[in-house]
Image (cartoon, rainbow, N blue to C red):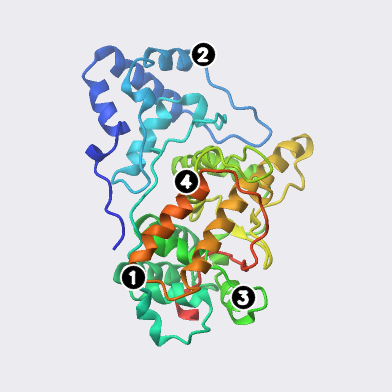
C-alpha cells in the first residue's frame, strides 16, 4: 500500500494551521489580507519582464515576520495541498514571482525511511532473464493500489485523438503522490542494458507524448506558465532546492533521495522532464532556448538545471544501481531494508559521477496496455 496521506497535525508547522493562528491576531490577519490582494493581482509574467513586488506588499510581509506563517510548509501528499500552497506563496510574495533562494521550497524536508516490502518471490512466473523494467511493472501489477493508479494514467495518457492532456497530467501526479515510493521509483528508474532492445522498446513506448506541451515552446515561456500555477511553481522550487548541484562530482545540496523526490514531483506539471538517452542518465525539458534573445543565458541555465545537472544524474544513477542489485541475486525480503540503509549512506557523501551501464531511454512510465 502507499504511504498514508499526512494529516495537518503530523506536519511540523503546516500553513493551514499557521493561517488559523494568524486569524486570531488582528494585526496578523490584516497583513495577510493585504498580501492576498497583492498575490491575487499578479499577472503571468512574460520571459522578458523582470519580477517585482510593490513596496507596500513587502511591508505587509514584514508585519508577518514574527508569525508562524513565515516558516510554515506543506507536504505533497497532504490533503488540502492546494490551499496550503496558496497560503505559503501569499506570505512570500517575492518568492511567488520566481526569485531563487537556496531554501525556498514550500515542502517540509522529509524523506521516507520505511523499509521496502516488495515480495520479489512473486516474480517467479517471469523468465529469469526478463528485463528489470518488466519485473518492476509486474510488482506494480501485483499491488492493487499501484495497479489501479497506473491503469488510470495509462488510460488518460493514451496517445492519439483520445489524449486529454490536462487529465493525463492530473493522473500522472496522482500516481506519484499516492503510489508507494518504491513502486513509483521502480517504474520510473528501472535500469536495462543498452543492448536489451526489448527493454528499450518498452521504455520508448512509455511515452506519454500526451503529457508533453504541444510543439516545442521556449523554456522561459514554459517556466512562466509554471509560475502561474502554484502547484507547478512549488514543485519547481522544491527541485531547485534539493537538486542544486554543489560541485561537478554530483554532490547535492541535500540528500540524493530528496532530490529524486523533488524530481518525481515535477512529473505531471508543465515542467514535466524526460530521459533522453540510452547510455546515460541525462534528462531534459521538452522545450528550446531558440528565440530567447538577450535572455539566452538565463534560458540555458534553466535548461542545464535538467540536462547537465550532476546532482540529479548521480542520484538517478545510484538508484538505478540499487534497483539492478535488487534482482542480481535471490534477495530475501529481510535484506531489502539493509539495502535502503546502504543507499542512504551513499546519498550523504560525494559520489563521483559516471554514466550508469544499465541506463535506458526513460520517457516517463510505460503505459500499462503496452506490457
- Is the residue under label 3 in contact with that under label 4 (CB below 8 Å)? no
Cα–Cα span, label 4 and label 3: 27 Å
- Marks 4 and 1: which is nearer the front? 4
Figure quadrant of the N terminus: bottom left
Residue 365 position, x and y percent, is: 50, 67
Q: Is residue 97 left or right of residue 282?
A: left
Q: Earlier in the sequence, mark 1 or mark 2?
A: 2
Q: Earlier in the sequence, mark 4 or mark 3?
A: 3
- Is the residue under label 1 in contact with that under label 4 (CB below 8 Å)? no
Looking at this view, is 355 or 96 the one in front?
355
Which residue carries the number 1 mark? Answer: 148
- Is the residue under label 2 in contact with that under label 1 (CB below 8 Å)? no
Secondary structure at numbered mark 2:
helix
Quarter residue 139 falls in = bottom left
Q: Earlier in the sequence, mark 4 or mark 2?
A: 2
Secondary structure at numbered mark 4:
helix
Mark 3 neighbour class, 10 Å CA radius: few under 14, some 14 to 19, many 20 or more: many
Mark 2 neighbour class, 10 Å CA radius: few under 14, some 14 to 19, many 20 or more: few
Residue 235 against residue 67 in the figure, above or below? below
**Residue 200 badge:** 3
Taking the spot 63% from the left edge, 56% from the top edge, the residue there is 283
> Can see residue 188?
yes
Which residue carries the number 4 mark? Answer: 258
- Marks 4 and 3: which is nearer the front? 4
Cα–Cα span, label 4 and label 1: 26 Å
Q: Earlier in the sequence, mark 3 or mark 1?
A: 1
Taking the spot 38% from the left edge, 68% from the top edge, the residue there is 152
- Marks 3 and 1: which is nearer the front? 3
Which residue carries the number 2 mark? Answer: 55
Residue 28 position, x and y percent, is: 30, 16
> Can see residue 256?
no
Amino acid at each position: 500500500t502507499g504511504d498514508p496521506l499526512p494529516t495537518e497535525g503530523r506536519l511540523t508547522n503546516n500553513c493551514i494551521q499557521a493561517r488559523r493562528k494568524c486569524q486570531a491576531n488582528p494585526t496578523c490577519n490584516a497583513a495577510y489580507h493585504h498580501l492576498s490582494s497583492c498575490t491575487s493581482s499578479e499577472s503571468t509574467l512574460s520571459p522578458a519582464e523582470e519580477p517585482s513586488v510593490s513596496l507596500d506588499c513587502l511591508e505587509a510581509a514584514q508585519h508577518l515576520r514574527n508569525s508562524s506563517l513565515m516558516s510554515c510548509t506543506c507536504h505533497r501528499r497532504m490533503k488540502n495541498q492546494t490551499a496550503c500552497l496558496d497560503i505559503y506563496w501569499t506570505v512570500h510574495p517575492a518568492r511567488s514571482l520566481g526569485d531563487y533562494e537556496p531554501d525556498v521550497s514550500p515542502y517540509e524536508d522529509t524523506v521516507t525511511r520505511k523499509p521496502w516490502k516488495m515480495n520479489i518471490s512473486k516474480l517467479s512466473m517471469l523468465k529469469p532473464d526478463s528485463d528489470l523494467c518488466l519485473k518492476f511493472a509486474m510488482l506494480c501489477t501485483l499491488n492493487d493500489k499501484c495497479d489501479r493508479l497506473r491503469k488510470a494514467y495509462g488510460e488518460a495518457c493514451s496517445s492519439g485523438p483520445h489524449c486529454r492532456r490536462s487529465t493525463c497530467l492530473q493522473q500522472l501526479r496522482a500516481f506519484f503522490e499516492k503510489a508507494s515510493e518504491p513502486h513509483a521509483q521502480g517504474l520510473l528508474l528501472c535500469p536495462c542494458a543498452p543492448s536489451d532492445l526489448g527493454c528499450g522498446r518498452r521504455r520508448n513506448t512509455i511515452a506519454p507524448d500526451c503529457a508533453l506541451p504541444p510543439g516545442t515552446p521556449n523554456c522561459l515561456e514554459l517556466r512562466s506558465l509554471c509560475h502561474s500555477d502554484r502547484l507547478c511553481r512549488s514543485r519547481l522550487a522544491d527541485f531547485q532546492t534539493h537538486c542544486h548541484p554543489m560541485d561537478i562530482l554530483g554532490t547535492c545540496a541535500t540528500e540524493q533521495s530528496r532530490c529524486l523526490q523533488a524530481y518525481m514531483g515535477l512529473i505531471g506539471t508543465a515542467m514535466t522532464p524526460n530521459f533522453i538517452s540510452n547510455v546515460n542518465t541525462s534528462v531534459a525539458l521538452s522545450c528550446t532556448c531558440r528565440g530567447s534573445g538577450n535572455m539566452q543565458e538565463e534560458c540555458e541555465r534553466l535548461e542545464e538545471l535538467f540536462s547537465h545537472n550532476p546532482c540529479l544524474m548521480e542520484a538517478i544513477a545510484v538508484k538505478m544501481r540499487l534497483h539492478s542489485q535488487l534482482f542480481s541475486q535471490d534477495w530475501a525480503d529481510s535484506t531489502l531494508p539493509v539495502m535502503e540503509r546502504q543507499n542512504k549512506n551513499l546519498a550523504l557523501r560525494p559520489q563521483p559521477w559516471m554514466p550508469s551501464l544499465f541506463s535506458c531511454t526513460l520517457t516517463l512510465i510505460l503505459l500499462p496496455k503496452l506490457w
